[in-house]
């Protein structure tokens, strides 16, 4: 983008190696970190993003001081979408987005987003996704909240699993041998991700970044907490422990933070929690779970399993409406004409959507629409997190009648609540 444009007097281009020191500084400043990440971690992070996938904006008027005014990049993701075969779909994972506080409201974010959208559309991505630091920014670009998480704080002294039947045939939970962690966890996570709509699959670079604190040893890197891994043949849990800073000085309260919980089977879910709820010297467990997780129903007293918050997690933007609608499966037959408005990119339109035996066919239509919605609404209902009827009740989706609304709900319903499970 030319810097001669008086309406946008900045240099917008793709990153070079020379930009990265400033990118790390800008990221730390924007997201309230103590400082840029250590040099020892930077190579692993850099390996996740090619320079051609990073947009930077510099202010050429600044000759003394920080000229980097904006940065945005994306990660090439795969996400499970609803359907009987749990299809896995390519998605552009927007991340590392920031505009310097000195350069707000000058069109920088919109320019970066437009540039990235051009690339995503040219590479024929059907979906884009992000984790939003602020909930009011991205709807204008067509993103809608598409997965949610429940945050729990569990008092383990009171939260005990219900009496069980004979468990003599169950597989035991063990602490993973350090040398096996990098071999076993990616396989288990991939198995799990194929069972849950919205799950973000982790590629080799993502796992390398997760394990960059020396995964094959029990000794954590300086300045990091020890990570413990519980392992079941059908699942795992990674957690660390720390003193609760809000606790009284005279009473030590230790909190376990479970930051990765994967269970492919009901047995794995139950047995992993049997261990987590009996950790020695630990008072509370913090964890984020899918909105349909059965843990509160599996304990004798659900009150100590206290849901502290329900929050948005992954947001979704539909980039190619016909492709996205045909890639996912459906729970009921449907024959409607849908009008979708896309103010940012103008890639909406009116489409006939016919679903038979769970398989959709989509084609442009000139018929009168039965359904109208904004493209951000389509992103929110796509994975099944929000029912079309809920959007209709909120005044954000219009249908020609209650029968059509009910048919949309049946078709878009999923067996499991969508859950991303990976921060990016």
Image (spheres, grey):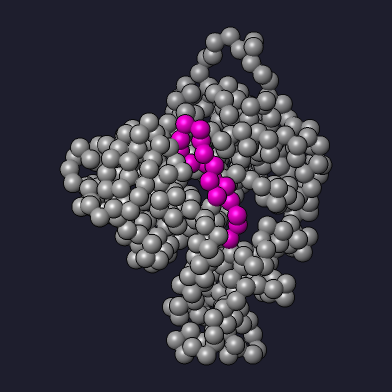
Q: Is residue 82 left or right of residue 248?
A: left
Give the quarter of the image for residue 166. Answer: top right
Number of on-image labels = 0
Residue 411: x percent and y percent?
A: 34, 36
Residue 84 counted in the magenta span? yes
Q: Is residue 297 above or below residue 362?
A: above
- In depth, the one of 314 and 32 nearer the eye is 314
- In depth, the one of 307 and 72 nearer the eye is 72
Residue plotted at (68% across, 35% down): 187
- In depth, the one of 327 and 407 nearer the eye is 327
Residue 66: x percent and y percent?
A: 63, 81
Residue plotted at (51% across, 35% down): 86
Residue 80: x percent and y percent?
A: 52, 41
Which region shows up in magenta? 74-90
Looking at the rendering, in which quadrant would you find the N terminus?
bottom right
Residue plotted at (54% across, 10% down): 165
Residue 48: x percent and y percent?
A: 68, 57
- Is residue 413 visible in the rendered structure shown here? no
Residue plotted at (35% across, 34% down): 356
Q: Is residue 394 left or right of residue 379?
A: left
Give the quarter of the image for residue 404. Answer: top left
């Amino acid at each position: 983008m030319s810097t001669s444009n008086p309406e946008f007097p900045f240099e917008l281009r793709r990153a070079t190696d020379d930009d990265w020191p400033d990118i790390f500084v800008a990221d730390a400043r924007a997201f309230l970190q103590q400082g840029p990440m250590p040099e020892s971690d930077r190579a692993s992070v850099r390996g996740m993003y090619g320079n051609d996938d990073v947009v930077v904006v510099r202010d050429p008027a600044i000759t003394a001081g920080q000229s980097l005014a904006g940065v945005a990049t994306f990660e090439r993701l795969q996400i499970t979408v609803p359907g009987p075969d749990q299809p896995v779909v390519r998605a552009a994972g927007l991340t590392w987005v920031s505009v310097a506080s000195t350069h707000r409201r000058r069109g920088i974010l919109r320019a970066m987003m437009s540039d990235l959208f051009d690339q995503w559309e040219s590479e024929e991505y059907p979906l884009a996704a992000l984790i939003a630091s602020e909930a009011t920014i991205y709807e204008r670009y067509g993103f809608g909240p598409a997965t949610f998480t429940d945050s729990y704080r569990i008092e383990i002294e009171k939260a005990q699993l219900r009496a069980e039947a004979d468990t003599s045939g169950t597989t035991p939970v063990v602490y993973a041998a350090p040398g096996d962690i990098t071999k076993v966890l990616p396989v288990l996570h991939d198995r799990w991700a194929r069972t849950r709509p919205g799950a973000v699959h982790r590629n080799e670079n993502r796992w390398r970044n997760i394990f960059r604190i020396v995964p094959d040893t029990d000794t954590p890197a300086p300045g990091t907490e020890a990570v413990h891994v519980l392992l079941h043949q059908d699942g795992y849990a990674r957690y660390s422990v720390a003193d609760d800073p809000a606790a009284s000085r005279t009473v030590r309260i230790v909190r376990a933070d479970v930051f990765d919980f994967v269970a492919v089977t009901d047995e794995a879910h139950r047995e992993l929690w049997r261990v987590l709820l009996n950790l020695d010297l630990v008072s509370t467990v913090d964890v984020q779970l899918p909105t349909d997780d059965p843990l509160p129903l599996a304990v004798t007293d659900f009150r100590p399993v206290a849901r502290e918050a329900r929050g948005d997690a992954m947001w979704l933007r539909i980039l190619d409406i016909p492709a996205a609608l045909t890639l996912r499966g459906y729970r009921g037959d449907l024959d409607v004409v849908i009008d979708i408005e896309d103010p940012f990119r103008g890639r909406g339109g009116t489409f006939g959507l016919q679903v038979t035996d769970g398989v959709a066919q989509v084609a442009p239509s000139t018929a009168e629409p039965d359904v109208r919605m904004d493209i951000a609404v389509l992103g929110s209902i796509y994975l099944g997190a929000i029912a079309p009827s809920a959007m209709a009740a909120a005044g954000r989706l219009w249908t020609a009648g209650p029968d059509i609304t009910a048919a949309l709900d049946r078709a878009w319903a999923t067996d499991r609540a969508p859950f991303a499970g990976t921060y990016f």
